[in-house]
């Protein structure tokens, strides 16, 4: 009877153990938070400034007349592309034109007299003085004609450089003087993109920094370096100016076109960078969770960090993480310090 009782009790205990074993194991697994981790490795961190700029001519000049007169004819308008030497406008030079005609007539007569005196002198008729006087008169009239012709040329306004006519300041029938601008021409071959940047970045932007220039209207982009960084801050907006020289792609780039610039103002090699979304900043105190092994298990360890620059989805870590640390990138929202975790395959 006792033997039967012992066997029955042993059977009951075994059955109980079999039923409670798996339940206890599942309960323990249920306490673990599933996370994904990423090993921290050194990398290069790049920071960019995205700004807008404007295409300008690197050589823009004002064209002024060389004589005071009434505008008689204008041959161009704003936006026209002109070559060096092209006639932009003509002024009223009627008085000088009349004087030229008179001197040309006098010169023709003087040359005839000179030839006559020369022939007479060859035949020993006439004096040497008469021949010299005739020759002197010819030379004098030729000089006078050249002077008048030069003066008359001043009544024609020409382009001193090739490029695009930006502005036309004059109108037909209006008097203009040598000190007044008549046209503004921008050299369309020597172009630059200018842009303004907040003074907060003055110490981070240097000549030779890489910059990507996009021209949306032409669907073109090119990579250049900054050529000019102004060291003067505009007091009206607290900005400074940069310039990037660009070629005229297919001759299609025009002054005043919109440009988009991405300036690489910071590049740091061999640094710790991590996904920005892995960082938590309650009350401004930045921290992350890293996986640490507590043999034979894993736990989440709260790790304070010093956050540096950020760009897009990446953050530069100045302090708090080292290469080889296992950064928790998924599942961190359910964690607190020393929470038991199970690491999933990414």
Image: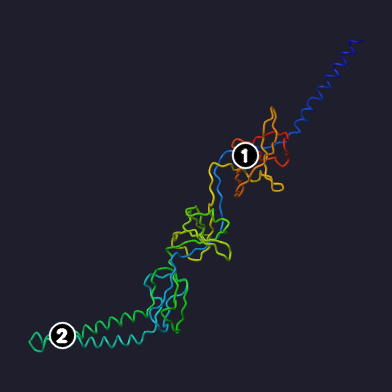
Q: Earlier in the sequence, mark 2 or mark 1?
A: 2
From the image, tell me which residue sits under label 1.
321
Q: Quadrant of residue 203?
A: bottom right
Name the mark on residue 186: none
Residue 275 vertical placement versus 154 (above, below): above
Left or right of 185 in this view: 261? right
**Where in the figure is residue 291, as x and y percent of width and height?**
67, 35
Residue at image x 42%, y 81%? 177
**Where in the figure is residue 178, as x and y percent of width and height?**
41, 79
Residue at image x 30%, y 81%? 149
Left or right of 297 in this view: 137? left
Color theme of the render: rainbow
Helix, strand or loop under label 1: loop
Nearest the camera: 267 or 199? 199
Helix, strand or loop under label 2: helix
Q: Residue furthest left?
A: 124
Q: CA distance from mark 2 to mark 1?
A: 102 Å
From the image, tell me which residue sits under label 2.
132
Q: Residue furthest right?
A: 1
**Where in the figure is residue 18, as x and y percent of width and height?**
80, 22
User: Disc count in the image?
Assistant: 2
Residue 185 vertical placement versus 34 (above, below): below
Residue density around tag 1, few if under 14, some if 14–19, many if 20 or more, within 10 Å: many
Nearest the camera: 309 or 62? 309
Residue 220 vertical placement versus 309 (above, below): below
Residue at image x 37%, y 70%? 84
Which quadrant: the C terminus? Answer: top right
């Amino acid at each position: 009877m006792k033997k039967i009782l012992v066997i029955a009790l042993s059977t009951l205990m075994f059955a109980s153990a079999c039923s409670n074993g798996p339940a206890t194991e599942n309960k323990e697994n249920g306490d673990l938070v599933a996370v994904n981790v990423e090993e921290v490795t050194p990398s290069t961190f790049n920071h960019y400034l995205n700004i807008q700029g404007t295409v300008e001519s690197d050589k823009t000049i004002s064209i002024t007349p060389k004589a005071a007169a009434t505008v008689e004819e204008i041959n161009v308008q704003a936006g026209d592309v002109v070559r060096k030497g092209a006639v932009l406008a003509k002024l009223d030079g009627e008085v000088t034109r009349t004087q030229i005609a008179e001197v040309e007539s006098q010169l023709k007569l003087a040359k005839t007299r000179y030839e006559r005196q020369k022939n007479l002198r060859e035949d020993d008729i006439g004096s040497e003085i008469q021949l010299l006087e005739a020759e002197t008169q010819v030379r004098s009239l030729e000089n006078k004609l050249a002077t008048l012709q030069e003066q008359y040329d001043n009544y024609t306004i020409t382009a001193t450089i090739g490029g695009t006519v930006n502005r036309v300041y004059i109108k037909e029938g209006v008097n203009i003087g040598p000190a007044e601008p008549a046209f503004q021409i921008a050299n369309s071959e020597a172009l630059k993109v200018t842009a303004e940047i907040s003074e907060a970045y003055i110490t981070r932007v240097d000549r030779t920094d890489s910059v990507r220039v996009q021209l949306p209207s032409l669907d073109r982009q090119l990579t250049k370096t900054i050529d000019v960084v102004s060291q003067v801050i505009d007091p009206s907006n607290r900005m400074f100016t940069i310039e990037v020289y660009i070629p005229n792609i297919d001759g299609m780039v025009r002054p005043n076109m919109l440009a988009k610039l991405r300036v690489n103002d910071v590049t740091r090699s061999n640094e710790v960078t991590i996904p920005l979304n892995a960082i938590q900043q309650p009350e401004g105190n930045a921290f992350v969770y890293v996986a640490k092994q507590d043999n034979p298990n894993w736990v989440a360890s709260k790790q304070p960090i010093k956050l540096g620059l950020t760009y897009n989805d990446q953050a530069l870590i100045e302090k708090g993480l080292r290469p080889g640390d296992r950064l928790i990138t998924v599942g961190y929202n359910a964690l607190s310090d020393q929470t038991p975790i199970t690491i999933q395959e990414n």
